[in-house]
Amino acid sequence: MTSADPLLRVNDLAVEFQTDEGTVHAVNGISYEISAGESLGIVGESGCGKSVSSLAIMGLVPRPAGRVTQGEITFGERDLLKLSTHEMRLVRGQQIAMIFQDPVSSLNPVYPVGRQIEEALRLHLKMSRPDARARAAELLDTVGIPAPEERVKDYPHQLSGGMQQRAMIAMAISCQPDLLIADEPTTALDVTIQAQVIELLAGLRRELGMAVILITHELALVAGFCDRVAVMYAGYIVEYAPVRELFARPQHPYTVGLMKAVPTLIGERTEQLANIPGSPPDLLDLPHGCPYAPRCPFVRDECRVEVPDLRDRGDGHPVRCIVDPTTGDLR
Ligand SMILES: Nc1ncnc2c1ncn2[C@@H]1O[C@H](COP(=O)(O)OP(=O)(O)O)[C@@H](O)[C@H]1O
Ligand SMILES: [Mg+2]
C-alpha cells in the first residue's frame, strides 16, 4: 500500500462531533494515500463520513462541534493538522481545491461567475486585473462553457446546473492545484450532464496532471475514473483496492451488496436502489463488533465481538472482514 512518495497520506484519521445526544463518531481511524496524478474513489452510502473526512483534509471541519481527535494528514512534507489557519488558507488556495455537490451554495449569487474566478486568481496567484479577467474566460473555455467571453458576465442563476458545476470546476482548477477533491460533483445533476462532468474531470486530470479524490455514493461512477477505491461504512474504510481488482474480486460483504444494488432513474436523476436491507448504524451508538454485522448476510457470532482490523493478506487489497463472502467461511 505504500508507494515511495505519496502526495497525500491520511493516517489513522478520526473525527468526532459533540452533539446534544452525545458523541457522533463520524470518521473512525481511516488511512489512505494518493500519489501525484492519481485518482482515488471514496464510495459509500450517505452519512458514512466521506465529506467529513475530506473537510478534515481541507481544515474545514465545522467547529466547535467537530474535532479531529487523532491521526495525521501529510501533504508533501507537512502535517496539515499542524498548520496555522493562515498556512492552511494558502494550501487551500494553491495546492488543494475542493468542489461540492451543490454548486448553487458554493457560488456567490451576487457576483458574476467570471468575477469570482478573477478574484481567486488575484488573491492566490497575485495576477493583475486584466490578466485575471482574460484567464477567467480561458478557464471557462477549458471547462467547456460555450461563448466564455460572454458567460464571464453571467450571474450564477443565469447558468444551468451543469454549467454552474463547470464554473465551480473552473474556479477549483484556477490555481492549478496538485489535488482536487470532488465531493459528489454530479449528484445534483441530470444523468446525461453527470457523464459530461465526469468526462470533463477525467480530461482535466490528464491535462493538468492533478491527483483527484472522487467522492460518490455510486460505485459505478468510480469504475471508469479512478485508479483505486476506498469503500467506507460507518466511518471506517472497509475495503481498499485497485479499481479493477475491486470490481473483479469484491471482498467485503458491503461492497458485494453495493455491486448488486442497481442504480435506478428517479425523474432525471439516478439513485442507488436501497436493496441492501436495513440501514447504516447510528454513529452515536455504534454496535459492538463489525458495524455492518446487523445487515450482513454472512454474519457470524465472531463478527459481533470486535471491529475487525483492516487486514491486507499480502495482495494489496485490505479488507475489514473476517468472513470470505465467496464461501461464507472464516478467512
Ligand atoms: N456538523 C455536524 N454535527 C454533527 N454531526 C455531523 C455534522 N456534520 C456531519 N455529521 C455527521 O457525521 C457523519 C458523516 O457525515 P458526512 O461525512 O457528511 O457523510 P457523507 O458525506 O458520507 O454522506 C453523519 O452521521 C453526519 O450526521
Ligand atoms: Mg457527503
Image (cartoon, grey):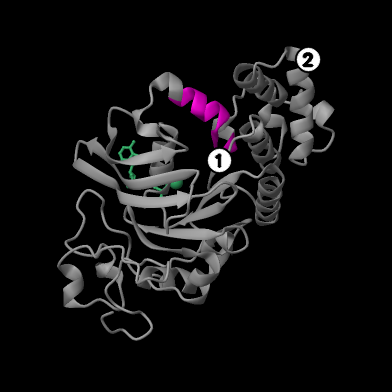
Is 292 above or below relative to 215?
A: below
| Residue 67 locus on image (x, y percent) | 28, 34
- 55 drawn magenta: no
Mark 1 Cβ and ligand 2 under 8 Å apart: no
The CA distance from mark 1 to mark 2 is 27 Å
Q: Is residue 96 magenta?
A: yes
Looking at the rendering, the stretch of residues picked out in magenta corresponds to: 88-103
Q: Is residue 82 left or right of residue 209?
A: left
Q: Nearer the viewer, residue 289 or 22?
A: 289
The answer to which quarter of the image holds residue 227 is bottom right
CB within 8 Å, label 1 to label 2: no
Residue 217 at what x, y percent from top left?
A: 48, 56
Residue closer to the observer: 97 or 61: 97
Residue 110 seen in the current view: no
- Residue 91 vs 320, above or below: the answer is above
Quadrant of image for the C terminus: bottom left
Residue holding disc 1: 179
Taking the spot 64% from the left edge, 21% from the top edge, the residue there is 125
Callout 2, which amino acid?
A: Pro
The answer to whether mark 2 is within 8 Å of ligand 2 is no
Name the foreground residue: 181 vs 1: 1
Q: Does 38 sit left or right of 321 as displayed?
A: right
Is 108 rendered above or below residue 80? above
Q: Quadrant of the N terminus?
A: bottom left
Q: Residue at x 34, y 86 (%)?
A: 327
Residue type indicated by callout 1: Leu
Decide if residue 271 is in sight here.
yes
Which of 145 and 267 lies nearest the eye of the viewer?
145
The residue identified by callout 2 is 130
- Residue at horizontal 37%, vertical 48%? 49
At mark 1, the secondary structure is strand
Q: Is residue 321 above or below residue 35?
A: below
